[in-house]
Image (tube, rainbow, N blue to C red):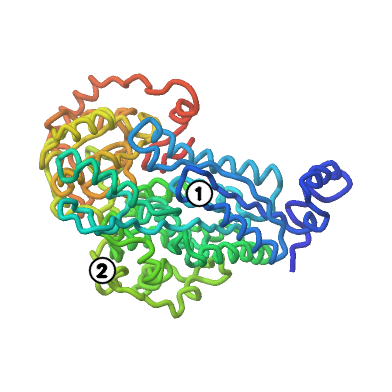
């Protein structure tokens, strides 16, 4: 039974709204459509992001579902940036900052037009958390349906001179191959061949990178239907899921179920537990706190470590291993992961989801169909989770590492600092093979304020991996890493260098110790020496002095707070 008084009545009902209706009529809407709930369909389709190139098909399916269930769908767009294309140059400064733009724009359009319910159609990196932040602000009946993951690439042939020949590929392999070229592991012709096979078609990049991490966590929160995180983009099942999302948002509307009912503290604890089990991107430690903040909840990074300590890691998807999202889907997807976690009461299964049912009801009868891809909880890859937050005198407010993608050789490591004041300096040193085994690369002034925009360092970490140094060299930055990054790559070092954080005081050759499993990082410099260096330190001139990035730098918080705008 439809709700008698609708939010959209503020824009559509009564004599005073005759001018408003005339504008709806100008777009071809009928009285019958305006009498139904108006459902915003926010589609991030564009023609540059491979994960978004076919979102128009998802939007059409969603709208069909909404109509079947008695609603009136109204589509409007959201922007998006492809992190892979933006990587390694000025464009990466503009990636993270779009998260807030997306949240703000969805909020503005939804409130300006008094929409009754929402279906969000994101897929890639900042679009998912941006829309989730908007969902928390608006607190309307809301369902998410992503575009789905890309299938892995495959390089055909059996060329013994090419280590990638005959293997499945992801974007990580492409970035690492660039590093391999620099040290003669492959040649330019082989690299050229790879780039035509690594990303075979539409979808969010094929591993457990940031996009797929956030789509999986959306499903865990309960805001996406089962399958949202893992059903491949190219399948008919993805289109069917979109139709069901459209139908289900009307069910939520009729039952009065809104987004914040799936954004409680318990929901976020579930998301963090699943994050640890899945081995999600380190970027989730920016996005989950930011989303929670919009819902009035604070994520304590020390609590994250407690959850990580008790939650086994069950998946080694790329970049941690050489398996892919489509294989996790075959194994049972996110629901199978939740079923494994439920065996040891590591999640709260009593929480409501967009199915209208609880997690317990959703996972009833769910089977783990491939214990090699999704380890049973009795036989995990490790007893602790995929993410760790390290604290110490170099990072008093924390630094984040994707532990599940880190070589065991670097779990406890001490090495000399190699200090660079931006990503390009570090990349030049890597390409000239100036980084040696045992080094701890420090890249600073790349934080939320200092960058500004907190660039990802995938190009640097991948180049090191391509040179065979991923088990021998650690990297710490106040910037961040791609979900495709592997190795001892510590990001989000807080406080950042631009505000005088300890990372600004590191000098070439200082010894740095990482103790990942004990959540510690230490700069081997006395407190007295650090105090002396701090007194001598001068804040650098801002890198950007006008435009959106300059405004962003003035408003953005520290990474440990989710790099939210204040």
Q: Residue sitting at 62 percent across and 52 percent down?
A: 41
Q: Residue sitting at 36 percent across and 75 percent down?
A: 368
Figure check: 230 above or below 433:
below
Q: Which mark is residue 291?
A: none
Residue lying farthest to the right in this orientation = 15
Query: Closest to the observer: 96 or 428?
Result: 428
Asked if residue 480 lies left or right of residue 413, the reply is right
> For mark 2, does the 10 Å Cα neighbourhood hold few (<14), some (14 to 19), or many (20 or more) residues?
some
Write down the quadrant of residue 17 in the picture.
top right
Asked if residue 369 lies left or right of residue 52, the reply is left
Q: Earlier in the sequence, mark 1 or mark 2?
A: 1
Q: Position of residue 546 (x, y in %)?
A: 47, 21
Is there CB contact under 8 Å for labels 1 and 2?
A: no
Q: Secondary structure at mark 1?
A: loop
Q: Residue sitting at 81 percent across and 58 percent down?
A: 32
Query: Closest to the observer: 532 or 53?
Result: 53
Q: Position of residue 502 (x, y in %)?
A: 25, 32
Q: Which residue is mark 2?
A: 380
Residue 266 can be seen in this image: no
Give the foreground label among 1 and 2.
1
Q: Position of residue 565 (x, y in %)?
A: 48, 36
Asked if residue 55 lies left or right of residue 391, the reply is right
Q: Position of residue 373 (x, y in %)?
A: 30, 68
**Alpha carbon distance from label 1 to label 2:** 36 Å
Figure check: 305 above or below 240:
above
Quadrant of the image for the N terminus?
bottom right
Figure check: 61 above or below 394:
below
> For mark 1, does the 10 Å Cα neighbourhood hold few (<14), some (14 to 19), or many (20 or more) residues?
some
Q: Residue sitting at 31 percent across and 38 percent down?
A: 494
Q: Which residue is mark 1?
A: 53
Query: Closest to the observer: 26 or 528?
Result: 26
Asked if residue 414 lies left or right of residue 123, the reply is left
């Amino acid at each position: 039974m439809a709700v008698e008084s609708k939010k959209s009545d503020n824009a559509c009902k009564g004599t005073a709204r005759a001018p408003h209706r005339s504008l709806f009529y100008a777009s071809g809407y009928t009285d019958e459509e305006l009498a139904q709930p108006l459902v915003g369909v926010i589609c991030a389709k564009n023609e540059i992001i491979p994960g978004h190139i076919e979102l128009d098909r998802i939007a059409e399916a969603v709208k069909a579902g909404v109509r079947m269930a008695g609603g009136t769908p109204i589509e409007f767009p959201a922007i998006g940036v492809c992190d892979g294309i933006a990587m390694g140059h000025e464009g990466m400064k503009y990636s993270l900052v779009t998260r807030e733009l997306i949240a703000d724009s969805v909020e503005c359009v939804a409130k300006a037009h008094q929409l009754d319910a929402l279906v969000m159609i994101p897929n890639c990196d900042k679009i998912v958390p941006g829309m989730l932040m908007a969902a928390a602000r608006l607190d309307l009946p809301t369902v998410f349906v992503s575009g789905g993951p890309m299938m892995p690439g495959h390089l055909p042939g059996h060329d013994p001179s090419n280590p990638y020949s005959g293997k499945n590929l992801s974007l990580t392999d492409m970035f690492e191959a660039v590093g391999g070229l620099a040290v003669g592991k492959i040649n330019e012709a082989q690299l050229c061949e790879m780039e035509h096979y690594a990303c075979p078609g539409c979808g969010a990049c094929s591993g457990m990178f940031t996009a797929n991490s956030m789509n999986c966590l959306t499903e865990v929160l309960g805001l996406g239907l089962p399958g949202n995180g893992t059903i491949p983009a190219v399948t008919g099942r993805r289109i069917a899921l979109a139709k069901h999302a459209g139908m289900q948002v009307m069910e939520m509307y009729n039952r009065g179920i809104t987004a914040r009912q799936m954004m409680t503290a318990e929901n976020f604890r579930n998301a963090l537990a699943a994050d640890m089990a899945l081995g999600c991107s380190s970027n989730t430690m920016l996005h989950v706190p930011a989303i929670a903040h919009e819902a009035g909840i604070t994520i304590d990074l020390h609590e994250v470590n407690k959850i990580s300590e008790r939650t086994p890691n069950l998946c080694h998807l790329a970049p941690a291993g050489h398996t892919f999202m489509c294989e996790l889907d075959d194994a049972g997807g996110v629901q199978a992961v939740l079923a494994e976690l439920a065996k040891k009461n590591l999640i709260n299964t009593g929480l409501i989801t967009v199915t209208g049912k609880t997690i317990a009801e959703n996972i009833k009868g769910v089977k783990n169909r491939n214990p090699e891809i999704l380890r049973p909880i009795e036989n995990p890859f490790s007893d602790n989770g995929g993410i760790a937050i390290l604290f110490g005198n170099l990072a008093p407010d924390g630094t984040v590492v994707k532990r599940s993608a880190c070589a065991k050789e670097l779990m406890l490591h001490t090495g000399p600092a190699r200090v660079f004041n931006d990503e390009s300096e570090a990349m030049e040193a890597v390409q000239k093979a100036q980084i040696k085994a045992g080094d701890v690369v420090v890249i600073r002034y790349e934080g939320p304020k200092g960058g500004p925009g907190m660039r990802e360092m995938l190009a640097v970490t991948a180049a090191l991996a391509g040179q065979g140094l991923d088990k021998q060299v650690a990297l710490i930055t106040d910037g961040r890493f791609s979900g495709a990054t592997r190795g001892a790559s510590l990001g989000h070092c807080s406080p950042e260098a631009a505000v005088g954080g300890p990372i600004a005081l590191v000098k070439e050759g200082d010894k740095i110790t990482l103790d990942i499993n004990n959540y510690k990082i230490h700069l081997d410099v006395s407190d007295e020496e650090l105090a002396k260096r701090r007194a001598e330190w001068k804040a650098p001139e801002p890198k950007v002095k006008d435009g959106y990035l300059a405004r962003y730098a003035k408003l953005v918080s520290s990474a440990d707070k989710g790099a939210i705008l204040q």
